[in-house]
Amino acid sequence: MDFSIIVDTFEQMERTSSRLALTDYLVSLLRKTPTDIIDRVIYLIQGKLRPDYEGVELGLAEKMAIRAISLCTGLDVESIEQIYRKTGDLGDTAGEVMKSKNQTTLLAEKMTVERVYLTLDKIAHSGGTGSQDAKLRLVSSLLSDATPRESRYIMKFIMGTLRLGIADYTVIDALALAFTGDKSYRQILENAYNVSSDLGTVAKLLAIKGLESLRLLEITLYKPVRPMLAERVRSAEEAMVRMKGQSLAAEYKLDGERIQVHKGKEKVELFSRRLEKITHHYPDVAEAIQKLIKTNETILEAEVVAINAQTDEFLPFQELMHRRRKYGIKEAIEEYPVVINIFDVLYIDGDDKTSLPYLQRRKLIEKATKGLKNEKVRLVPQAIVKKTEDLEKLMAVAIEHGCEGLMIKQLTSSYRAGARGFAWIKLKREYRSDLADTLDLVIVGALYGRGRRVGKYGALLLAAYDSKADMFRSTCKVGTGFTDLHLEHFYKNLEDTRITHRHPRVDTGMQMDLWFEPKIVIEVSASEITLSPSHTAGINSIRENYGLALRFPKFTGKIRVDKNPEDATEVEELISMYKRQMRSIKNTRALPKS
Ligand code: ATP
């Protein structure tokens, strides 16, 4: 397949600001793609070479990329660096340099998708001494045969700066439309994606073996399963109503990082909530699992939490950030000790356990962790509760122990991969006061800073996720709660996601100085939700032409690196929070004065 077909499509996608057009372009690209390489094309669309959990990275230093451009255009490194400073992107730089050099390719070898993919794959897999030189040769041979437009995208792939911002759900929609002609089959595709976390494989199975083959996809060791998620309630009473007065399991909701543990005979792998391999951040946890867990092949879900080694008290989520580093892991293990608390099991020795009811799964993890007490691997504290008062009491105990609150679980529920529902309910401390609830929102734009903030961002435009339309709709501008360190951090990291116009998946009535690809999620608190003529989250749901805005939003200091933009607070949640808030205002007014 000619690589230029991908280039044409990506150029169209970059230019559009219509979300529907994005899907249409994808559908027509997928229809043109030969089935034997459809998995690779899917990965390229997502800006990667393999599914996230394999952790394949190209690892080409910026300097090397610049040298490669220099090698095949003859332009000196300094001039290329100058253009790079202007464009801010090495892909754009490569395109520009090659265009101005009037690079006409003699096409020694045709530029096909297969060739681009295989070369990138080789780059990713060359390691050890002399590997940077080998990578340099591979990149420049590719660029020498490419047109300026092609080299622009090749370089974007290599540097990881392709900013199409396509969600997995858009790809699923496009696949359903391209291969079944009917979007309603998306559920089958989504289920297959939930157990495999690999859209490339899903696409290939669908294209070659058809829809039925997707139903047969099974949970496999070392391939993460998309996590089951919880709905929120405001009070113990509401939780009881949601559980229809039945007995329920109340577990500590620990304030740490969710981890999916895959334990085999030879190795243990750990995956984050975003399904990235993060074993290297917690080698101590992997070792403890291998030593202490008694089953052979097992997939477990757990929360890793930082603790105070002297007092054994739980510490807040932010402490874990010290463990997310490339170097000095050994020191960090000593300095920032963690424990892992198991709360679920999905698979044991070839058997999928997700369809078992909660209580049976709990028995299995009790067995697997039998005899462990105060060690690195622990079982999440849990109690079976029937009465609201008991739930309230437990909530107080959990908070006293440094937890965020409780996770309340239906005793009969199976494990529903990738789904958010009321079989799991989170009851957090914040929800008890009047909208002191925190939200996880996506940064989509910014205003330049003034005064003390010149040269940094003044305010960030934040959006909630509308999963029905796969759009990000704005709900506030936030300018408070940032330390100087945060501001610098954002300035550096947001630069990497900067685009020239509002992203097609972003909807807002606000005018901003800068726009970003929706990527980074941060946590904010707010005093209340109000109706707004300029923000578009929940527009027309309460009043015509009005959306919902956060009043007095404040950054809490938490950057949710464990969340994808599609995991941000949903517009629907915002609407129900608004309705709840209005009900509680009405109820307070109706109370007799004492
Ligand atoms: P939040 O923003 O409230 O942390 P979330 O959006 O990250 O939630 P949810 O599924 O809504 O994810 O809340 C559940 C999260 O709580 C899990 O992802 C997990 O990280 C954490 N957690 C802590 N303790 C438990 C527990 N006992 N059972 C399940 N999840 C737990």
Image: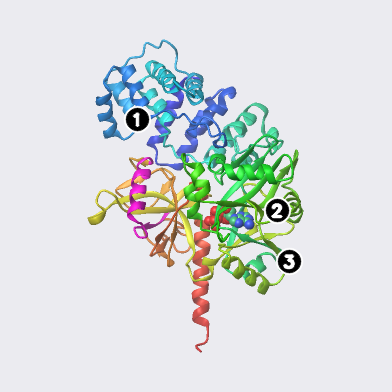
Q: Which residue bears the numbered disc 2?
A: 372
User: How far apart, in angstroms, are the residues tagged by discs 1 and 2?
Assistant: 52 Å
Please say if 14 is above or below 435: above
Measured as percent of width and height from the top left, residue 54 is found at: 57, 34
- Which of the two residues, 511 or 569, is positioned nearer the viewer here? 569
Q: Which residue bears the numbered disc 1?
A: 90
Foreground disc of the pair 3, 1: 1
Foreground disc of the pair 2, 3: 2
- Which of the two residues, 61 or 180, is positioned nearer the viewer here? 61
Q: Is residue 109 left or right of residue 179?
A: left
User: How far apart, in angstroms, are the residues tagged by discs 2 and 3?
Assistant: 30 Å
Write down the region rendered in magenta: 474-497
* Mark 3 neighbour class, 10 Å CA radius: few under 14, some 14 to 19, many 20 or more: some
Distance from mark 2 CB to nearest ligand 1 atom below 8 Å:
no
- Which residue, as the protein is rendered here, is positioned at the far bottom? 594
Q: Secondary structure at mark 3?
A: loop
What amino acid is labelled 1 in the image?
Answer: Leu
Measured as percent of width and height from the top left, residue 243 is found at: 69, 64
* Mark 2 neighbour class, 10 Å CA radius: few under 14, some 14 to 19, many 20 or more: some
Q: Which residue bears the numbered disc 3?
A: 246
Please say if 276 is above or below 205: below
